[in-house]
Amino acid sequence: MGFGLLIAGFILLFNPVIVVVDVIPDAIGFFLIVAGLSKMSCFIDKLAQARDGFLKLAFTEVVKFFSIALLAGTTGSMKVLLAFVFGLIEAMMFLPAVSNLFEGLSFAGLWYGGEAIYAKKAVRRTVRVRTKSGGETAVRKEKRTVQIEKLGATKRFIEFFYLFRIVATLIPELTELQMYDYLGTVDARALSLTSFKPLFYIFFVFVTLIFGVFYIVRVVRYFGAVRKDKPFIAAMERKYVNDILPKTTYFIAKNMKIALMLFGFSAGTSFLLPIDDVNILIGAISSGFLIAAAVIVGKYVKSAYIVIIPAALRAGLSILNFILESQYFGEYFAGAVLRVSDADHKYYTLASLKVVECVLAIASTLFFIAVLMKAVKAHLEVCGIQTENAQYSKRSRDLETYNVIGGKLLLTSILAIINTVMMGAYLYLLVTMSMVFVISIAISIVYAAYAIYSAYVINNLLYEKEIEMS
């Protein structure tokens, strides 16, 4: 039922993180956890919520992985900001996901007879004992053996370890916030806390690895025992095979929900984010999400696989453009084209390549929207209430839904074109309009917000209802 993937996913979260550099990207671990929960989440609501939470965490970690590009030549305060922002987001998303996971497991153990889920262990603890003698109450401490549920103990240790790892990542970076108030003569013997940062790194990496060993042991012991509970696993398998597998539209809805989420991420990462005039939000990120969405939609509309070609070309070209932009703006500024002939040639070559990248971007996006509309039309026919009578007309209802979705996607297409045209013209306009990035970012935000809203509406009108009906 996926407990092996669950164990592997949690194990891959054990390693320390320095700023945003993760030797084993957490995204891999979270995707494995999501895969492990896929079957059980089909018939246990809390596990479905946990799966959605871990899926969002996985995509967040993908963004975190690509944010490594920000570390090149950045200031210490930027590192503090990155560590704090990602740490805060991770904590806010991880705790509810873990809570839903263990609540779901608790329900599953109660409903399907999971003895291993409610297993207990004996622990020696110091407890306070109150005794009355001669009207006076005396308190003494003594060692006693108490029974503790492994479910709660494992949950608490997982939460503790993950929060400790976040704190251990942030503390070394806080040394960058040290402020000096020099009055009179500057003392050369004054020490900066940043000089101790390597020692902080070594210490917290070492401590995190020690806690990581205990964390792995806890995870393997608990989930491994649940995995070996054969009657429980067999009952869950019967439920999945008999009640879930026959519902083909349920799996269509689940897959398309993920595809729409990926499309939202693609739109949300498809805008200019210039730092020192270099766009750090590489187009490969947006194209990667779009390719993943196209692969899912391709299960129902084969022509969706064509999206992969322009999206992959755009991804490769965006990486090349990022390198060329870094080289150019490391040597010149945009206005140098008006004064330096060598800069003129380099800059407009770069601008031309950016236009080509934008053409590929809009081609892949528009084609994906077209095949998405085609998929929606096909799914409307098989999803929902399959009745036609005087009180309810499925054909009329489907036509109404199709028109609403069509209108949303049409406006999304228009905004995508405007956004991409602006991205292509950005370098040309930057020469004479230094504040053009404000206009570009504003347009991108409008496009991203509406695309995400459209994906949300499509999911609610069609796929979320199908999941609820199942």
Image (tube, grey):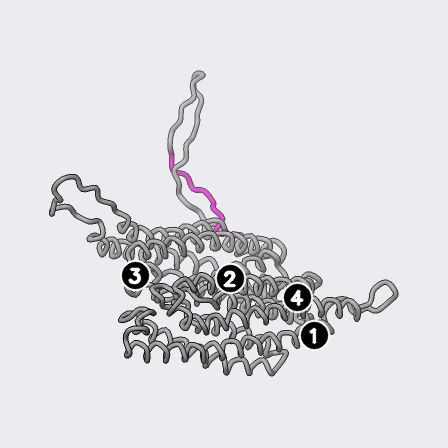
**CB within 8 Å, label 1 to label 3:** no
Q: Earlier in the sequence, mark 1 or mark 2?
A: 1
Say if the magenta span includes residue 157: no
Dot in front, 4 or 2: 2
* Residue identified by numbered label 2: 445
Crowding at label 4, few (<14), some or many (≥20) Cα neighbours within 10 Å?
many
Identified by mark 3, the residue type is: Thr
Identified by mark 1, the residue type is: Lys
- Helix, strand or loop for disc 3: loop
Q: Is residue 224 visible?
A: no
Q: Is residue 99 left or right of residue 461?
A: left
**CB within 8 Å, label 4 to label 2:** no
Dot in front, 2 or 3: 2
Identified by mark 4, the residue type is: Tyr
Dot in front, 1 or 2: 2
Q: Give how far apart the Cα atoms at labels 3 and 4 are.
A: 43 Å
* Residue identified by numbered label 1: 377
Dot in front, 3 or 4: 3
Residue at the image point whose x is 62% and y is 68% from the top: 411
* Residue identified by numbered label 3: 74
Identified by mark 2, the residue type is: Ile
- Residue 165 at x, y percent in the picture: 36, 54
* Residue identified by numbered label 4: 463
Q: Which residues are magenta?
A: 142-151
- Helix, strand or loop for disc 4: helix
- Residue 464 at x, y percent in the picture: 66, 63
Q: Give how far apart the Cα atoms at labels 1 and 2 are.
A: 29 Å
Quarter occupied by residue 402: bottom right
- Residue 89 at x, y percent in the picture: 45, 54
Q: Is residue 72 left or right of residue 151?
A: left
